[in-house]
Image (cartoon, helix red, strand yellow):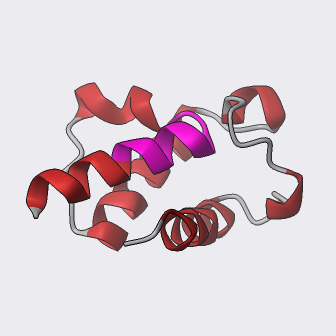
Amino acid sequence: MQTAEIQAKLLDRLTRIAPDIDPRRIVADQDFRDQFDFDSMDALHFAVAVSEAFGIPIPDSDTGQLTSLQKAVDFVQARLASKA
């Protein structure tokens, strides 16, 4: 799966969880908490949504790797590569 496809899917899930987020204004390498009101429940819901969207397990210990768009893209790419 291409990086752009992963990013688009992640943005879709992110805006479903927090519909007030404008995906065009997200800075990819900046933590979500620093960009908008993204609390721990939002982070948990995002991790679950990412797991379901890509069919990859995300243990609680790995949710810290989903704190920015770039980190989430990198995490998903690595997990998908290890599944192949």
Q: Residue at x 37, y 43 (%)?
A: 75
Give the left or right position of residue 19, taking residue 65 as reference: right
Q: Magenta: predominant secondary structure element?
A: helix
Q: Up-down: is 9 above or below 7? A: below
Quarter of the picture containing the N terminus is bottom left
Q: Which range of residues does the magenta coloring cover? A: 67-75
Looking at the image, residue 13 sits to the left or right of residue 64; the answer is right
Return the x and y of residue 67 as percentages of the image width and height: 55, 33
Residue 80 counted in the magenta span: no
Give residue 16's position: percent from left, percent from top: 63, 70
Quarter location, residue 31: top right
- 23 shown above or below 68: below
Choose between 80 and 39: the one closer to the eye: 80
Q: Residue 48: x, y in percent?
A: 35, 56
**Residue placed at 86% from the left, 61% from the top?**
24
Identify the residue shown where x is 81% and y is 57%. Answer: 21
Relative to the observer, which residue lies in front, 7 or 56?
7
Residue 62 lies, in percent from the top left, at 29, 31
